[in-house]
Amino acid sequence: MKYASELTGAASSIVRLMDAVQPLPVPTPSLTVVGTGIRAVSQLTLEAVAAMAGAEALLHVIGEPIQEEALLAINPNAKTMTDLYADGLERSHTYEAMILEVMAELEKGKRTVAAFYGHPGVFTYPSHESVRRARAAGFPARMLPGISAADCLYADLGIDPGEGCQAYEATSFLLHLPPVDPSAYLLLWQVGTIGNWTYESAGYDLSSFPILVDALARIYGTAHLATLYEAPFDPRGNARVERMPIASLPSAYLTPASTLLIPPLG
Ligand SMILES: C[S@@+](CC[C@H](N)C(=O)[O-])C[C@H]1O[C@@H](n2cnc3c(N)ncnc32)[C@H](O)[C@@H]1O
């Protein structure tokens, strides 16, 4: 990584800064769950950098090469848990394996940090569950917020969730069809993996996506404009923003990083 040494230096300064700002020692063992933001390096918070730099065990679920290298520059102990995903394996099994890895480091007596991309508490099960299990086992545990894909979306698309905003995981939305308030924004997460419980590196079977589109068309009509959104992971990249009528969604290009925004009617 081009700026690894700058990042290593910045991390040391940030540790000193945070020691001055929050002079509370982090207990050992303990668990800190952090978010690393979406845009690599630039969306790291100071407190997340300080926690990661001071970790005796740093486990992460990032999967984005620039950010993974950044974490190595911040702490050479950084270790990915994305290798626990396996084709055809239910993601819930992988999440359980991640939680067990985090708990194993705590049980070894280490000051442990688990890092997840975005905000660690937003549509992420192993982060919340690690905190719950660590506390149940008697370890101090905390979660530090990060910049989520939703935060990037509000900024890039110029919307204020205070005007009313509902958010659902797409598969769960399709299964339960909760009542929708069409005067508020609707955010659907994980549309690019809808209907799939397993991890598939070669791409997902999205045959249930048109069923979701039909459900949306019944609420909003086929001509209502929806936006497919992807925030850039690369700090130099641009967001992918595609506006189209709901009727055109079935032919849209979806990836596991796609989020669908349906603006209010009227
Ligand atoms: C398991 S959730 C993780 C969300 C993450 N914790 C956060 O705070 O953004 C994965 C979903 O987040 C959304 N997502 C992840 N990366 C994104 C990106 N770069 N742009 C837009 N949405 C994204 C997509 O809906 C994706 O299916």
Image: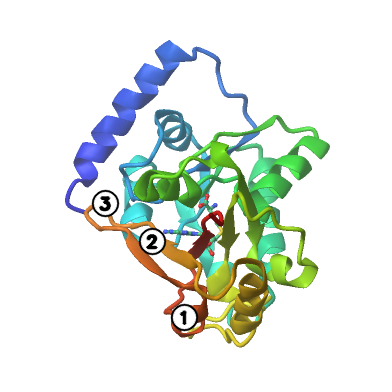
Instruction: Determine the residue positioned at 35% across, 49% down.
Output: 156
The spot of residue 167 in percent (x, y) is 63, 53
Residue at the spot of label 1: 248
Q: Are marks 2 and 3 in contact (CB under 8 Å)?
A: no
Residue pointed to by mark 3: 235
Please name the residue shown 44% across and 64% down the image.
Answer: 227
**Residue 188, relative to residue 55: is it above or below?**
below
- Identity, as a three-letter code, of the amino acid under mark 1: Ser
Which quadrant of the structure image shows residue 169? bottom right
Position of residue 90 relative to residue 190, above or below, is below
Q: Earlier in the sequence, mark 2 or mark 1?
A: 2
- Distance between the alpha carbons at the discs numbered 2 and 3: 12 Å
Q: Is residue 137 visible?
A: no
In front of the other: 149 or 80: 149
Look at the picture and state if 67 lies above or below 205: above
Q: Does residue 167 appear to the left or right of 262 in the view shown? A: right
Q: Residues within 10 Å of mark 1 (few under 14, many from 20)?
A: some
Q: Earlier in the sequence, mark 2 or mark 3?
A: 2
Where is residue 23? Give x, y as percent. 49, 12
Q: Quadrant of the N terminus?
A: bottom left
Above or below residue 116? Residue 134 is: above
Tell me which residue sits at (46%, 76%) in the image.
Answer: 254
Q: Amino acid at mark 3?
A: Pro
Residue 165's disc is: none
The residue indicated by pointer 2 is 64
